[in-house]
Image (cartoon, grey):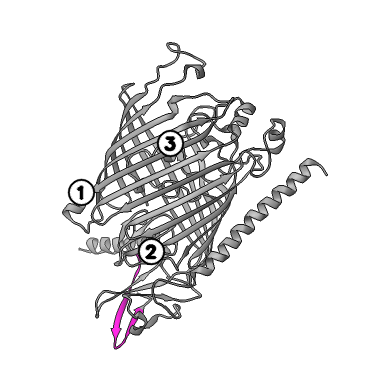
Amino acid sequence: MTSEGKTRREFLKDACTACMGVSFLGISLSQLTSCSPFPVYKTDLSKKIVTVPLSSFGESTMVIVRDMQVIYDVLLVKKSDQVYDALYMRCTHQENPLTATKTGLFCSAHGSRFDLDGNVLKEPALAPLKKFKTELQENQVLIDLNS
Amino acid sequence: MRFLIAFLFVFCSFSAFSQVLTKEDSLTAGLIRSNNTTVISGYGQLKTQYDFRLKTANTELTRNVLFVGHRFKNNIYFFSEMELENAKVVGGKASGEISMEQLFLKFNINRSTYLQAGLFIPRIGIINENHLPTTYNGNDRPFVETFVIPATWREIGVGLYGSINTVPGLNYSVAVLSGLNSANFTNDTGIVNGRMEGASSASSSIALTNAWLLYAGDWRIQASWYYGGSAGPKRQADSLHLQSGPFGIPVALAEANAQYHGRNGFSLRALVTGVSIQEAGKINFAYGKNTPQNMYGAYIELGYNFYKLINPTSAKNLTLFYRQEAMDLGLTRAKNYGEDNDVNRRFYSVAGITFQPTGGVIVKVDYVMRNTGDRNPALLATQFPRALPYYSSNGFFNVGIGYSF
């Protein structure tokens, strides 16, 4: 066994240990993402029109509309009893998924921030968030994903 | 009249066609199901600097970066940034530099977790990840994030990024990267020249880094650490009696920073960092260098956007700012193998105005006051008056423009 062979094994061992550690940490942390700070309404975002019942808001003024098959959510914001905004939670800078808070949306990748109207508060994003048309019908909000 | 109608038709057609080609439309068209989208964008900056001691101006195209991205699938992306510094590269002459700033594949695992593999910039400090000229004040990037934390510090590796929804606004990143090479460390630039930056270079060093980032209201708070080897190739390390292996001659770095970006127009940035190279003495013995054992750096910046006085909802930016920086690239030296050099104890005071007439375009005017300790004459091969004098206090006036699209 040469010293070089031993070092190669050691290198591979250390590199693999580090990679496994990263993977384990990632899997562990991913488990913590099952909860959300806002109500989540699961639906099929491949439809042209998505219907969200008002009851899904609960006590919150925001609902995350989610399709488990799609990487980006839609944030439905209650502006008033009659007005609802639907924002596509995809950063307009480099397409990273956005995180919603009570004061706005932010991108953890490069620091872009948006207000709850979708306007850019902080670059590098330049364009506002994509906004879908909404319509209130009885006790439901209709989101037009083709708008 | 026919000519006018024809002109309007052509104009409208061109406008419609142009819209299809814009980045934003091309990316958002088709909403969720579209694939195979390629995007070209970029950023850059130019500046003119006047040196009050030398009474000389220097004008340069600091950098131009071309970004090319491609979406293969809805969860697999390609990102690349190619940078040209100082306008041109001439063979055989001291001139600019062409380099890949980033080149990686990104795999979205789920809506809150993604993986990057390739040449990328890990989440260390503020400027490293967010280095577009339109996102910071002053023509120069903060000096602490240039000398203590290398600016745009990229290495080849694998990184995992995600957010923890149980704690709103909390994000993490963890990465395995190629390490440094201590053979290239220099006394006045810390670990900057020890980076691999994706260039083919024999090494057996690897590094780990981890960051935690919290968004809370108008605050962004982050802490990160880095630990990696710098022994270089095994055969070389062994022959120089340096401890070889993935984490041989370790370099440890830790930093914490906070940013406030208020809707009231006020902004704040603060960062503190330290670097430790405990076996610096061995590096100095092996390579005849003067590598420090410990370094530190810190800065705080305050700003106010005067457009908020006129219109609180305005997206325009006219910010008056002041930044104070302090660093010591030779805080402690290695016993027996190292010389004090007070020139590495530096203080920068930066004041200026940042003007953004629209998003993506920036005009910067600033004044930089640099104060350092004196040079150690024992470290100078050529003494004054045969060498140029060194001014421990000097001022620089900068005017520049920047863009990002």
The answer to whether mark 2 and mark 3 are in CB contact below 8 A is no
Q: Which residues are magenta?
A: A129-143
Q: Amino acid at mark 2?
A: Asp
- Look at mark 1 in the image and give the residue it sits on: B306
Between the C-alphas of marks 2 and 3, the distance is 31 Å
Q: Which of these two is toward me, A49 or B174? A: B174
The answer to whether mark 2 and mark 1 are in CB contact below 8 A is no
Q: Amino acid at mark 1?
A: Phe
2 or 3: tag closer to the N-terminus: 2
A71 above or below B120?
A: below
Q: Position of residue B79 (x, y in %)?
A: 50, 54
Q: Position of residue B38 (x, y in %)?
A: 48, 59
Q: Chain of mark 1?
A: B
A108 above or below B283?
A: below
Residue at screen point 34% across, 39% down? B139
Numbered badge on residue B25: 2
Q: Residue furthest top?
A: B385
Q: Residues within 10 Å of mark 1 (few under 14, many from 20)?
A: some
- Look at mark 3 in the image and give the residue it sits on: B87
3 or 1: tag closer to the N-terminus: 3
Q: Are marks 3 and 1 on the same chain?
A: yes
